[in-house]
Image (cartoon, rainbow, N blue to C red):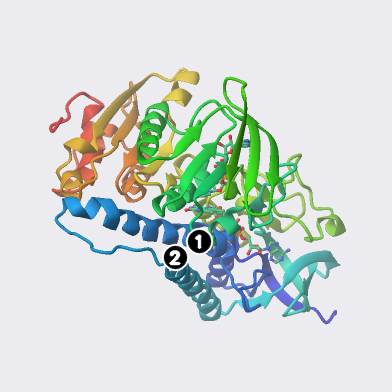
Amino acid sequence: MSDAKQFDVVVIGAGPGGYIAAIRAAQLGFKVACIDEWANAKGGPAPGGTCTNVGCIPSKALLQSSEHYEHAGHAFAEHGIDFAGLSLNLPQMLKRKETVVKQNNDGILFLFKKNKITFFHGRGAFTGAAEGGYQISVTGANADTLSAKHVVIATGSNARELPGAPFDEKLILSNSGALTISSVPSTLGVIGAGVIGLEMGSVWRRLGAKVTVLEGLPTFLGAVDEQIAKEAHKLFTKQGLEINLGVKISKVTAGENSVTVDYANAAGEAQSAVFDKLIISIGRVPNTIGLGADAVGLKLDERGFIAVDDDCKTNLPNVWAVGDVVRGPMLAHKAEEEGVAVAERIAGQHGHTNFNTIPWVIYTSPEIAWVGQNEQQLKAAGVAYKAGTFPFMANGRARALGDTSGMVKFLADATTDEILGVHIVGPMASELISEAVVAMEFRASAEDIARICHAHPSLSEATKEAALAVDKRSLNF
Ligand code: FAD
Ligand code: NAI
Protein backbone atom coordinates (compact mmCIF):
# COMPACT_ATOMS: atom_id res chain seq x y z
CA MET A 1 0.00 0.00 0.00
CA SER A 2 1.44 3.42 -0.99
CA ASP A 3 1.44 6.56 1.19
CA ALA A 4 -0.96 8.27 -1.21
CA LYS A 5 -4.15 9.64 0.29
CA GLN A 6 -6.95 7.50 -1.05
CA PHE A 7 -10.19 8.79 -2.52
CA ASP A 8 -13.08 7.28 -4.42
CA VAL A 9 -13.28 10.33 -6.70
CA VAL A 10 -10.63 12.97 -7.42
CA VAL A 11 -11.82 15.98 -9.40
CA ILE A 12 -9.17 18.10 -11.14
CA GLY A 13 -10.40 21.68 -11.51
CA ALA A 14 -12.92 23.55 -9.35
CA GLY A 15 -14.76 25.53 -12.02
CA PRO A 16 -18.52 25.02 -12.48
CA GLY A 17 -17.94 21.55 -13.97
CA GLY A 18 -15.51 20.37 -11.31
CA TYR A 19 -16.89 21.76 -8.07
CA ILE A 20 -20.44 20.70 -8.94
CA ALA A 21 -19.23 17.17 -9.87
CA ALA A 22 -17.42 17.02 -6.52
CA ILE A 23 -20.52 18.08 -4.58
CA ARG A 24 -22.82 15.62 -6.36
CA ALA A 25 -20.29 12.77 -5.87
CA ALA A 26 -20.08 13.62 -2.15
CA GLN A 27 -23.89 13.69 -1.90
CA LEU A 28 -23.88 10.18 -3.38
CA GLY A 29 -21.64 8.95 -0.55
CA PHE A 30 -18.18 8.95 -2.16
CA LYS A 31 -14.98 10.08 -0.52
CA VAL A 32 -14.07 13.04 -2.71
CA ALA A 33 -11.09 15.34 -3.28
CA CYS A 34 -11.03 18.39 -5.54
CA ILE A 35 -7.81 20.04 -6.76
CA ASP A 36 -7.64 23.56 -8.15
CA GLU A 37 -4.70 25.82 -8.79
CA TRP A 38 -6.41 29.23 -9.17
CA ALA A 39 -4.95 31.75 -6.73
CA ASN A 40 -6.35 35.11 -5.63
CA ALA A 41 -4.23 38.28 -5.41
CA LYS A 42 -2.91 37.17 -2.00
CA GLY A 43 -1.97 33.71 -3.31
CA GLY A 44 -4.85 32.00 -1.52
CA PRO A 45 -7.27 29.52 -3.11
CA ALA A 46 -9.92 30.95 -5.42
CA PRO A 47 -12.13 28.05 -6.52
CA GLY A 48 -14.80 28.63 -9.14
CA GLY A 49 -12.59 28.58 -12.22
CA THR A 50 -12.85 30.91 -15.18
CA CYS A 51 -16.54 31.44 -14.50
CA THR A 52 -16.12 32.81 -11.00
CA ASN A 53 -12.76 34.54 -11.34
CA VAL A 54 -12.55 36.01 -14.85
CA GLY A 55 -15.78 35.01 -16.60
CA CYS A 56 -19.49 34.84 -15.87
CA ILE A 57 -19.49 36.44 -12.43
CA PRO A 58 -17.13 39.45 -12.77
CA SER A 59 -18.43 40.22 -16.27
CA LYS A 60 -22.03 40.26 -15.03
CA ALA A 61 -21.02 42.43 -12.05
CA LEU A 62 -19.48 45.00 -14.42
CA LEU A 63 -22.36 44.71 -16.88
CA GLN A 64 -24.77 45.53 -14.04
CA SER A 65 -22.70 48.44 -12.71
CA SER A 66 -22.13 49.93 -16.14
CA GLU A 67 -25.82 49.59 -16.97
CA HIS A 68 -26.73 51.47 -13.78
CA TYR A 69 -24.26 54.18 -14.82
CA GLU A 70 -25.70 54.45 -18.29
CA HIS A 71 -29.27 54.52 -16.97
CA ALA A 72 -28.36 57.21 -14.47
CA GLY A 73 -26.87 59.24 -17.31
CA HIS A 74 -29.65 58.80 -19.87
CA ALA A 75 -32.64 56.63 -19.03
CA PHE A 76 -33.58 57.93 -15.57
CA ALA A 77 -34.38 61.46 -16.78
CA GLU A 78 -37.35 60.06 -18.69
CA HIS A 79 -38.63 58.60 -15.39
CA GLY A 80 -38.38 62.04 -13.81
CA ILE A 81 -35.20 61.31 -11.89
CA ASP A 82 -32.54 63.94 -12.40
CA PHE A 83 -28.94 63.58 -11.31
CA ALA A 84 -26.68 66.51 -10.66
CA GLY A 85 -22.96 65.89 -10.96
CA LEU A 86 -23.10 62.25 -12.02
CA SER A 87 -19.60 60.82 -12.03
CA LEU A 88 -17.92 57.47 -12.44
CA ASN A 89 -15.97 55.94 -9.57
CA LEU A 90 -14.25 53.18 -11.52
CA PRO A 91 -12.00 51.97 -8.65
CA GLN A 92 -15.14 51.39 -6.54
CA MET A 93 -16.87 49.62 -9.45
CA LEU A 94 -13.87 47.29 -9.86
CA LYS A 95 -13.66 46.79 -6.08
CA ARG A 96 -17.33 45.79 -5.92
CA LYS A 97 -16.72 43.30 -8.73
CA GLU A 98 -13.82 41.78 -6.77
CA THR A 99 -16.04 41.53 -3.67
CA VAL A 100 -18.69 39.68 -5.67
CA VAL A 101 -16.00 37.30 -6.97
CA LYS A 102 -14.66 36.68 -3.46
CA GLN A 103 -18.16 35.97 -2.13
CA ASN A 104 -18.44 33.25 -4.76
CA ASN A 105 -14.93 31.85 -4.02
CA ASP A 106 -15.76 31.71 -0.31
CA GLY A 107 -19.15 30.17 -1.04
CA ILE A 108 -17.50 27.27 -2.86
CA LEU A 109 -14.94 26.71 -0.07
CA PHE A 110 -17.89 26.61 2.36
CA LEU A 111 -19.71 24.08 0.15
CA PHE A 112 -16.59 21.88 0.07
CA LYS A 113 -16.54 21.86 3.88
CA LYS A 114 -20.26 21.29 4.16
CA ASN A 115 -20.04 18.27 1.83
CA LYS A 116 -16.83 16.93 3.44
CA ILE A 117 -14.84 17.30 0.22
CA THR A 118 -11.07 17.56 0.74
CA PHE A 119 -9.79 20.57 -1.20
CA PHE A 120 -6.20 20.76 -2.43
CA HIS A 121 -4.87 24.11 -3.62
CA GLY A 122 -2.37 23.35 -6.35
CA ARG A 123 -1.93 21.73 -9.72
CA GLY A 124 -3.11 18.18 -10.21
CA ALA A 125 -1.41 15.81 -12.64
CA PHE A 126 -1.62 12.13 -13.47
CA THR A 127 1.61 10.41 -12.51
CA GLY A 128 0.63 6.84 -13.31
CA ALA A 129 -1.48 3.93 -12.19
CA ALA A 130 -2.24 3.20 -8.54
CA GLU A 131 -3.79 0.19 -6.89
CA GLY A 132 -7.31 0.02 -8.33
CA GLY A 133 -7.03 3.37 -10.07
CA TYR A 134 -4.75 6.33 -10.71
CA GLN A 135 -2.06 8.22 -8.89
CA ILE A 136 -2.38 12.01 -8.93
CA SER A 137 0.27 14.43 -7.72
CA VAL A 138 -0.59 17.84 -6.32
CA THR A 139 2.07 20.53 -6.62
CA GLY A 140 1.68 23.92 -5.02
CA ALA A 141 0.39 25.10 -1.65
CA ASN A 142 -1.14 21.73 -0.67
CA ALA A 143 1.49 19.47 -2.29
CA ASP A 144 0.54 15.82 -1.87
CA THR A 145 0.05 12.50 -3.58
CA LEU A 146 -3.42 11.08 -4.02
CA SER A 147 -4.84 7.88 -5.38
CA ALA A 148 -8.26 7.72 -6.96
CA LYS A 149 -10.63 5.01 -8.18
CA HIS A 150 -12.34 7.58 -10.42
CA VAL A 151 -10.95 10.81 -11.84
CA VAL A 152 -13.06 13.67 -13.21
CA ILE A 153 -11.09 16.14 -15.33
CA ALA A 154 -12.63 19.62 -15.37
CA THR A 155 -9.65 21.79 -16.28
CA GLY A 156 -11.58 24.27 -18.42
CA SER A 157 -10.26 26.59 -21.11
CA ASN A 158 -8.08 29.63 -21.78
CA ALA A 159 -8.43 32.58 -24.17
CA ARG A 160 -7.18 31.87 -27.68
CA GLU A 161 -4.31 34.13 -28.78
CA LEU A 162 -4.23 35.79 -32.17
CA PRO A 163 -0.96 34.73 -33.86
CA GLY A 164 1.54 37.57 -33.60
CA ALA A 165 -0.41 39.37 -30.86
CA PRO A 166 0.32 37.72 -27.50
CA PHE A 167 -1.70 38.94 -24.52
CA ASP A 168 0.29 41.35 -22.34
CA GLU A 169 -2.86 42.26 -20.31
CA LYS A 170 -1.79 45.92 -20.44
CA LEU A 171 -2.55 46.90 -24.02
CA ILE A 172 -3.53 43.58 -25.62
CA LEU A 173 -6.13 42.06 -23.34
CA SER A 174 -7.77 38.68 -22.90
CA ASN A 175 -10.98 38.38 -20.89
CA SER A 176 -8.85 38.70 -17.72
CA GLY A 177 -7.36 42.07 -18.68
CA ALA A 178 -10.69 43.27 -20.09
CA LEU A 179 -12.19 42.95 -16.60
CA THR A 180 -9.49 44.99 -14.87
CA ILE A 181 -8.88 48.08 -17.03
CA SER A 182 -8.10 50.73 -14.43
CA SER A 183 -9.21 53.85 -16.34
CA VAL A 184 -11.75 54.08 -19.14
CA PRO A 185 -9.88 54.02 -22.47
CA SER A 186 -10.86 56.72 -24.97
CA THR A 187 -10.73 54.17 -27.75
CA LEU A 188 -11.13 50.43 -27.37
CA GLY A 189 -10.66 47.91 -30.15
CA VAL A 190 -12.25 44.48 -29.92
CA ILE A 191 -11.25 41.65 -32.25
CA GLY A 192 -14.10 39.10 -32.45
CA ALA A 193 -17.80 40.01 -32.26
CA GLY A 194 -18.68 36.93 -30.22
CA VAL A 195 -20.11 36.70 -26.73
CA ILE A 196 -17.11 38.17 -24.88
CA GLY A 197 -16.53 40.92 -27.46
CA LEU A 198 -20.13 42.11 -27.25
CA GLU A 199 -20.41 41.85 -23.46
CA MET A 200 -17.08 43.50 -22.65
CA GLY A 201 -17.48 45.99 -25.52
CA SER A 202 -20.84 46.97 -23.98
CA VAL A 203 -19.31 47.49 -20.52
CA TRP A 204 -16.60 49.87 -21.71
CA ARG A 205 -18.86 51.68 -24.20
CA ARG A 206 -21.35 52.40 -21.39
CA LEU A 207 -18.50 53.77 -19.28
CA GLY A 208 -17.45 56.14 -22.06
CA ALA A 209 -15.06 54.38 -24.46
CA LYS A 210 -15.45 54.61 -28.23
CA VAL A 211 -15.63 50.91 -29.08
CA THR A 212 -14.77 49.45 -32.48
CA VAL A 213 -15.43 45.74 -33.04
CA LEU A 214 -13.57 43.89 -35.80
CA GLU A 215 -15.18 40.58 -36.79
CA GLY A 216 -13.73 38.12 -39.28
CA LEU A 217 -16.98 36.59 -40.48
CA PRO A 218 -19.27 38.45 -42.89
CA THR A 219 -22.35 37.73 -40.77
CA PHE A 220 -23.12 39.12 -37.33
CA LEU A 221 -23.69 36.46 -34.63
CA GLY A 222 -23.91 33.61 -37.12
CA ALA A 223 -25.07 31.11 -34.47
CA VAL A 224 -28.06 33.27 -33.55
CA ASP A 225 -31.42 33.26 -35.36
CA GLU A 226 -30.96 35.64 -38.27
CA GLN A 227 -33.97 37.83 -37.47
CA ILE A 228 -32.86 38.19 -33.83
CA ALA A 229 -29.23 38.87 -34.83
CA LYS A 230 -30.34 41.57 -37.30
CA GLU A 231 -32.43 43.27 -34.62
CA ALA A 232 -29.53 43.06 -32.13
CA HIS A 233 -27.09 44.49 -34.68
CA LYS A 234 -29.43 47.42 -35.30
CA LEU A 235 -29.78 48.11 -31.55
CA PHE A 236 -26.06 47.81 -30.75
CA THR A 237 -25.14 50.09 -33.65
CA LYS A 238 -27.69 52.65 -32.42
CA GLN A 239 -26.04 52.50 -28.98
CA GLY A 240 -22.74 53.47 -30.59
CA LEU A 241 -20.90 50.15 -30.93
CA GLU A 242 -19.09 50.28 -34.27
CA ILE A 243 -19.25 46.76 -35.67
CA ASN A 244 -17.13 45.95 -38.73
CA LEU A 245 -17.84 42.57 -40.31
CA GLY A 246 -15.78 40.55 -42.79
CA VAL A 247 -12.44 42.04 -41.77
CA LYS A 248 -9.08 40.31 -42.12
CA ILE A 249 -6.55 41.25 -39.47
CA SER A 250 -3.04 41.46 -40.92
CA LYS A 251 -0.97 42.89 -38.07
CA VAL A 252 -1.28 43.97 -34.44
CA THR A 253 1.48 46.22 -33.11
CA ALA A 254 1.72 47.22 -29.46
CA GLY A 255 3.36 50.62 -28.94
CA GLU A 256 4.13 52.48 -25.70
CA ASN A 257 0.56 53.48 -24.88
CA SER A 258 -1.51 52.29 -27.81
CA VAL A 259 -2.06 49.38 -30.16
CA THR A 260 -2.22 49.61 -33.94
CA VAL A 261 -4.34 47.12 -35.83
CA ASP A 262 -3.81 46.76 -39.57
CA TYR A 263 -6.60 45.00 -41.39
CA ALA A 264 -8.49 44.70 -44.64
CA ASN A 265 -12.14 45.69 -44.48
CA ALA A 266 -14.98 43.73 -46.10
CA ALA A 267 -14.24 45.44 -49.44
CA GLY A 268 -10.61 44.31 -49.20
CA GLU A 269 -9.31 47.84 -48.57
CA ALA A 270 -6.29 48.22 -46.27
CA GLN A 271 -7.15 49.98 -42.98
CA SER A 272 -5.16 50.95 -39.92
CA ALA A 273 -6.71 51.78 -36.54
CA VAL A 274 -5.06 52.91 -33.33
CA PHE A 275 -6.62 52.03 -29.97
CA ASP A 276 -5.78 52.79 -26.32
CA LYS A 277 -6.55 49.15 -25.51
CA LEU A 278 -7.35 46.07 -27.56
CA ILE A 279 -9.44 43.11 -26.39
CA ILE A 280 -8.92 39.91 -28.34
CA SER A 281 -11.93 37.60 -27.97
CA ILE A 282 -11.72 35.05 -30.76
CA GLY A 283 -12.72 31.93 -28.85
CA ARG A 284 -11.13 29.73 -26.23
CA VAL A 285 -8.85 26.68 -26.20
CA PRO A 286 -9.08 23.65 -23.90
CA ASN A 287 -6.69 23.58 -20.96
CA THR A 288 -4.74 20.32 -20.68
CA ILE A 289 -1.31 21.77 -19.95
CA GLY A 290 0.53 20.05 -17.11
CA LEU A 291 -2.21 17.47 -16.62
CA GLY A 292 0.10 14.51 -17.25
CA ALA A 293 -2.11 13.14 -20.03
CA ASP A 294 0.91 11.30 -21.50
CA ALA A 295 1.72 9.56 -18.22
CA VAL A 296 -1.49 7.54 -18.48
CA GLY A 297 -2.21 7.64 -22.24
CA LEU A 298 -5.21 9.97 -22.00
CA LYS A 299 -6.47 10.65 -25.51
CA LEU A 300 -7.03 14.18 -26.85
CA ASP A 301 -8.95 14.91 -30.05
CA GLU A 302 -7.49 16.70 -33.09
CA ARG A 303 -8.41 20.13 -31.61
CA GLY A 304 -6.76 19.44 -28.24
CA PHE A 305 -9.97 18.74 -26.30
CA ILE A 306 -10.06 15.63 -24.13
CA ALA A 307 -11.79 13.01 -26.28
CA VAL A 308 -15.02 11.82 -24.63
CA ASP A 309 -18.14 9.94 -25.66
CA ASP A 310 -21.69 11.21 -25.09
CA ASP A 311 -21.43 10.13 -21.44
CA CYS A 312 -18.19 12.10 -20.82
CA LYS A 313 -16.13 8.88 -20.66
CA THR A 314 -12.52 9.20 -21.84
CA ASN A 315 -10.47 6.40 -23.41
CA LEU A 316 -9.28 5.37 -19.90
CA PRO A 317 -11.44 3.30 -17.56
CA ASN A 318 -12.99 5.37 -14.75
CA VAL A 319 -11.57 8.64 -16.09
CA TRP A 320 -14.18 11.21 -17.07
CA ALA A 321 -13.99 14.76 -18.42
CA VAL A 322 -16.56 17.58 -18.36
CA GLY A 323 -17.05 21.24 -19.24
CA ASP A 324 -14.94 23.48 -21.48
CA VAL A 325 -12.16 20.89 -21.80
CA VAL A 326 -14.48 18.62 -23.84
CA ARG A 327 -16.63 19.10 -26.97
CA GLY A 328 -19.82 21.11 -26.90
CA PRO A 329 -20.73 24.66 -25.93
CA MET A 330 -18.39 26.43 -23.52
CA LEU A 331 -21.02 27.38 -20.96
CA ALA A 332 -20.98 27.17 -17.17
CA HIS A 333 -24.39 25.50 -16.95
CA LYS A 334 -23.40 22.89 -19.56
CA ALA A 335 -20.29 22.11 -17.48
CA GLU A 336 -22.46 21.79 -14.34
CA GLU A 337 -24.97 19.47 -16.01
CA GLU A 338 -22.14 17.23 -17.21
CA GLY A 339 -20.57 17.28 -13.73
CA VAL A 340 -23.79 16.09 -12.09
CA ALA A 341 -24.38 13.46 -14.78
CA VAL A 342 -20.84 12.04 -14.41
CA ALA A 343 -21.09 11.80 -10.61
CA GLU A 344 -24.38 9.94 -11.01
CA ARG A 345 -22.90 7.60 -13.63
CA ILE A 346 -19.99 6.82 -11.26
CA ALA A 347 -22.67 5.81 -8.73
CA GLY A 348 -24.25 3.51 -11.32
CA GLN A 349 -27.16 5.86 -11.93
CA HIS A 350 -28.36 7.18 -15.29
CA GLY A 351 -27.11 10.77 -15.34
CA HIS A 352 -28.29 12.67 -18.38
CA THR A 353 -27.43 15.89 -20.21
CA ASN A 354 -29.89 17.08 -22.84
CA PHE A 355 -27.80 18.98 -25.39
CA ASN A 356 -30.94 20.09 -27.26
CA THR A 357 -32.18 22.22 -24.40
CA ILE A 358 -29.06 24.07 -23.28
CA PRO A 359 -29.94 27.78 -23.20
CA TRP A 360 -27.58 30.47 -24.47
CA VAL A 361 -27.60 34.02 -23.16
CA ILE A 362 -25.62 37.07 -24.25
CA TYR A 363 -25.82 39.62 -21.44
CA THR A 364 -25.83 42.75 -23.56
CA SER A 365 -28.57 45.33 -23.32
CA PRO A 366 -30.99 44.21 -24.55
CA GLU A 367 -30.09 40.63 -23.70
CA ILE A 368 -30.12 37.91 -26.33
CA ALA A 369 -31.24 34.39 -25.32
CA TRP A 370 -32.19 31.28 -27.17
CA VAL A 371 -32.78 27.55 -26.90
CA GLY A 372 -33.22 24.92 -29.57
CA GLN A 373 -32.96 25.45 -33.28
CA ASN A 374 -33.03 28.69 -35.25
CA GLU A 375 -34.78 29.41 -38.53
CA GLN A 376 -31.62 28.93 -40.64
CA GLN A 377 -31.03 25.50 -39.14
CA LEU A 378 -34.63 24.38 -39.68
CA LYS A 379 -34.53 25.55 -43.29
CA ALA A 380 -31.21 23.79 -43.90
CA ALA A 381 -32.60 20.57 -42.41
CA GLY A 382 -35.76 20.83 -44.51
CA VAL A 383 -38.04 20.85 -41.46
CA ALA A 384 -41.53 22.29 -42.02
CA TYR A 385 -42.09 24.89 -39.28
CA LYS A 386 -44.32 27.76 -38.21
CA ALA A 387 -42.93 30.99 -36.71
CA GLY A 388 -44.56 33.46 -34.36
CA THR A 389 -43.07 36.72 -33.05
CA PHE A 390 -44.23 39.30 -30.55
CA PRO A 391 -42.47 42.67 -30.03
CA PHE A 392 -41.79 44.03 -26.52
CA MET A 393 -43.11 47.35 -27.85
CA ALA A 394 -46.61 45.86 -27.45
CA ASN A 395 -45.97 44.59 -23.89
CA GLY A 396 -47.29 46.75 -21.02
CA ARG A 397 -44.56 45.81 -18.53
CA ALA A 398 -41.82 46.62 -21.05
CA ARG A 399 -43.40 50.04 -21.58
CA ALA A 400 -43.54 50.64 -17.82
CA LEU A 401 -39.88 49.60 -17.56
CA GLY A 402 -38.98 51.94 -20.38
CA ASP A 403 -37.32 49.12 -22.33
CA THR A 404 -39.37 48.13 -25.35
CA SER A 405 -36.61 46.94 -27.66
CA GLY A 406 -36.67 43.51 -29.24
CA MET A 407 -39.02 40.57 -29.52
CA VAL A 408 -39.79 36.97 -28.61
CA LYS A 409 -39.83 34.45 -31.44
CA PHE A 410 -41.25 30.91 -31.39
CA LEU A 411 -40.51 28.21 -33.92
CA ALA A 412 -42.81 25.19 -33.86
CA ASP A 413 -43.20 22.05 -35.95
CA ALA A 414 -45.72 22.71 -38.74
CA THR A 415 -47.51 19.41 -38.16
CA THR A 416 -47.21 18.58 -34.47
CA ASP A 417 -46.84 22.16 -33.12
CA GLU A 418 -43.94 20.93 -30.90
CA ILE A 419 -41.67 23.85 -29.94
CA LEU A 420 -38.39 23.56 -31.87
CA GLY A 421 -36.72 26.78 -30.78
CA VAL A 422 -37.34 30.01 -28.90
CA HIS A 423 -35.31 33.16 -29.55
CA ILE A 424 -35.44 36.38 -27.60
CA VAL A 425 -33.79 39.75 -27.88
CA GLY A 426 -35.10 42.11 -25.25
CA PRO A 427 -35.28 42.99 -21.55
CA MET A 428 -34.56 40.12 -19.12
CA ALA A 429 -34.26 37.62 -21.96
CA SER A 430 -31.92 35.62 -19.66
CA GLU A 431 -34.81 34.97 -17.27
CA LEU A 432 -37.55 34.62 -19.87
CA ILE A 433 -35.74 31.84 -21.71
CA SER A 434 -36.20 29.45 -18.75
CA GLU A 435 -39.88 29.00 -19.54
CA ALA A 436 -38.96 27.93 -23.06
CA VAL A 437 -36.32 25.51 -21.74
CA VAL A 438 -38.85 23.88 -19.42
CA ALA A 439 -41.42 23.71 -22.22
CA MET A 440 -38.93 22.06 -24.59
CA GLU A 441 -37.77 19.59 -21.91
CA PHE A 442 -41.40 18.50 -21.60
CA ARG A 443 -41.78 18.52 -25.40
CA ALA A 444 -44.56 21.06 -25.14
CA SER A 445 -46.36 22.53 -28.13
CA ALA A 446 -46.66 26.26 -28.82
CA GLU A 447 -50.37 25.84 -28.03
CA ASP A 448 -49.44 24.58 -24.52
CA ILE A 449 -47.67 27.87 -23.75
CA ALA A 450 -50.43 29.87 -25.42
CA ARG A 451 -53.01 28.29 -23.08
CA ILE A 452 -51.06 28.90 -19.84
CA CYS A 453 -52.07 31.89 -17.70
CA HIS A 454 -49.17 34.37 -17.45
CA ALA A 455 -49.14 37.16 -14.86
CA HIS A 456 -50.07 40.66 -15.99
CA PRO A 457 -48.26 42.92 -16.42
CA SER A 458 -45.12 40.87 -16.97
CA LEU A 459 -42.52 40.46 -19.68
CA SER A 460 -43.46 36.78 -19.80
CA GLU A 461 -46.72 37.76 -21.50
CA ALA A 462 -44.58 38.42 -24.58
CA THR A 463 -43.64 34.72 -24.49
CA LYS A 464 -47.30 33.67 -24.37
CA GLU A 465 -48.16 36.12 -27.14
CA ALA A 466 -45.34 34.84 -29.38
CA ALA A 467 -46.66 31.30 -28.83
CA LEU A 468 -50.12 32.53 -29.84
CA ALA A 469 -48.58 34.23 -32.88
CA VAL A 470 -47.41 30.83 -34.14
CA ASP A 471 -51.06 30.29 -35.13
CA LYS A 472 -51.58 33.97 -35.96
CA ARG A 473 -53.74 34.61 -32.91
CA SER A 474 -51.71 36.99 -30.74
CA LEU A 475 -54.14 39.16 -28.79
CA ASN A 476 -52.19 42.35 -28.18
CA PHE A 477 -50.50 42.86 -31.54
P1 FAD B 1 -13.23 26.50 -15.76
O1 FAD B 1 -14.26 27.38 -15.20
O2 FAD B 1 -12.27 27.08 -16.73
O3 FAD B 1 -12.42 25.91 -14.50
C1 FAD B 1 -11.32 25.10 -14.66
C2 FAD B 1 -10.49 25.20 -13.38
O4 FAD B 1 -9.51 24.18 -13.41
C3 FAD B 1 -9.74 26.51 -13.23
O5 FAD B 1 -9.88 26.99 -11.90
C4 FAD B 1 -8.29 26.14 -13.50
O6 FAD B 1 -7.36 26.95 -12.81
C5 FAD B 1 -8.27 24.73 -12.96
N1 FAD B 1 -7.20 23.87 -13.50
C6 FAD B 1 -6.84 23.68 -14.79
N2 FAD B 1 -5.88 22.74 -14.88
C7 FAD B 1 -5.61 22.35 -13.61
C8 FAD B 1 -4.72 21.40 -13.05
N3 FAD B 1 -3.92 20.64 -13.80
N4 FAD B 1 -4.72 21.26 -11.71
C9 FAD B 1 -5.53 22.01 -10.92
N5 FAD B 1 -6.40 22.92 -11.40
C10 FAD B 1 -6.44 23.07 -12.73
N6 FAD B 1 -20.67 30.91 -19.33
C11 FAD B 1 -21.97 31.00 -19.02
O7 FAD B 1 -22.67 29.99 -18.98
N7 FAD B 1 -22.54 32.21 -18.72
C12 FAD B 1 -21.82 33.35 -18.75
O8 FAD B 1 -22.36 34.43 -18.48
C13 FAD B 1 -20.45 33.28 -19.08
N8 FAD B 1 -19.70 34.39 -19.12
C14 FAD B 1 -18.38 34.29 -19.43
C15 FAD B 1 -17.63 35.47 -19.51
C16 FAD B 1 -16.30 35.42 -19.83
C17 FAD B 1 -15.51 36.70 -19.90
C18 FAD B 1 -15.69 34.15 -20.07
C19 FAD B 1 -14.22 34.06 -20.39
C20 FAD B 1 -16.42 32.99 -20.01
C21 FAD B 1 -17.78 33.04 -19.70
N9 FAD B 1 -18.57 31.91 -19.67
C22 FAD B 1 -19.90 32.00 -19.37
C23 FAD B 1 -18.02 30.57 -19.92
C24 FAD B 1 -17.74 29.84 -18.60
O9 FAD B 1 -16.86 30.62 -17.82
C25 FAD B 1 -17.15 28.47 -18.86
O10 FAD B 1 -17.96 27.75 -19.76
C26 FAD B 1 -17.02 27.70 -17.57
O11 FAD B 1 -16.21 28.37 -16.65
C27 FAD B 1 -16.44 26.31 -17.83
O12 FAD B 1 -16.34 25.63 -16.63
P2 FAD B 1 -15.26 24.48 -16.41
O13 FAD B 1 -15.50 23.96 -15.04
O14 FAD B 1 -15.27 23.54 -17.54
O15 FAD B 1 -13.85 25.21 -16.48
P1 NAI C 1 -16.93 33.34 -29.55
O1 NAI C 1 -16.73 32.04 -30.20
O2 NAI C 1 -18.23 33.65 -28.92
O3 NAI C 1 -16.66 34.52 -30.61
C1 NAI C 1 -15.45 34.64 -31.27
C2 NAI C 1 -15.65 35.54 -32.47
O4 NAI C 1 -14.38 35.88 -32.99
C3 NAI C 1 -16.43 34.86 -33.60
O5 NAI C 1 -17.45 35.70 -34.05
C4 NAI C 1 -15.36 34.62 -34.65
O6 NAI C 1 -15.87 34.63 -35.97
C5 NAI C 1 -14.41 35.76 -34.40
N1 NAI C 1 -13.06 35.53 -34.85
C6 NAI C 1 -12.32 34.39 -34.73
N2 NAI C 1 -11.09 34.59 -35.24
C7 NAI C 1 -11.04 35.87 -35.69
C8 NAI C 1 -10.04 36.66 -36.30
N3 NAI C 1 -8.82 36.17 -36.55
N4 NAI C 1 -10.34 37.93 -36.63
C9 NAI C 1 -11.56 38.46 -36.36
N5 NAI C 1 -12.56 37.75 -35.79
C10 NAI C 1 -12.29 36.48 -35.44
O7 NAI C 1 -15.71 33.48 -28.53
P2 NAI C 1 -15.46 34.47 -27.31
O8 NAI C 1 -16.26 35.70 -27.42
O9 NAI C 1 -13.99 34.54 -27.19
O10 NAI C 1 -16.04 33.65 -26.08
C11 NAI C 1 -15.57 32.32 -25.85
C12 NAI C 1 -16.67 31.50 -25.28
O11 NAI C 1 -16.88 31.84 -23.92
C13 NAI C 1 -18.04 31.71 -25.92
O12 NAI C 1 -18.18 30.99 -27.11
C14 NAI C 1 -18.93 31.19 -24.87
O13 NAI C 1 -18.99 29.79 -24.96
C15 NAI C 1 -18.23 31.59 -23.59
N6 NAI C 1 -18.85 32.80 -23.05
C16 NAI C 1 -20.16 32.76 -22.70
C17 NAI C 1 -20.80 33.87 -22.23
C18 NAI C 1 -22.24 33.78 -21.90
O14 NAI C 1 -22.76 32.69 -21.80
N7 NAI C 1 -22.93 34.89 -21.72
C19 NAI C 1 -20.10 35.14 -22.06
C20 NAI C 1 -18.74 35.10 -22.51
C21 NAI C 1 -18.15 33.96 -22.96
Q: Secondary structure at mark 2?
A: helix
Distance from disc 2 to disc 1, alpha carbons, whole Å, reads: 7 Å
Amino acid type of the residue tagged 1 in the rendering:
Ser
Q: Is residue 6 above or below residue 209?
A: below
Residue designated by label 2: 90
Give me the residue at 41% from left, 33% from top: 233
Image coordinates of residue 396 in percent, x first then y, are 14, 43
**Residue 374 occupies quadrant:** top left
Residue designated by label 1: 183
Mark 1 CB in 8 Å range of ligand 1? no
Residue 185 left/right relative to 319? left
Badge 1 crowding class, 10 Å Cα cut-off, few under 14, some 14 to 19, many 20 or more, is: few
Image coordinates of residue 121 in percent, x first then y, are 68, 75
Residue 82 seen in the figure: yes
Q: Is residue 88 above or below residue 467?
A: below
Badge 2 crowding class, 10 Å Cα cut-off, few under 14, some 14 to 19, many 20 or more, is: some
The residue nearer to you, when weighing 92 against 294, is 92
Tag 2 near tag 1, CB within 8 Å: yes
Residue 158 left/right relative to 374? right
Q: Earlier in the sequence, mark 2 or mark 1?
A: 2
The residue nearer to you, when weighing 364 against 245, is 245
Which image quarter is the C terminus in?
Answer: top left
Give me the residue at 19% from left, 59% from top: 82
Image coordinates of residue 211 in percent, x first then y, are 48, 44
Give me the residue at 62% from left, 21% from top: 268
Residue 410 left/right relative to 24? left
Which image quarter is the N terminus in?
Answer: bottom right
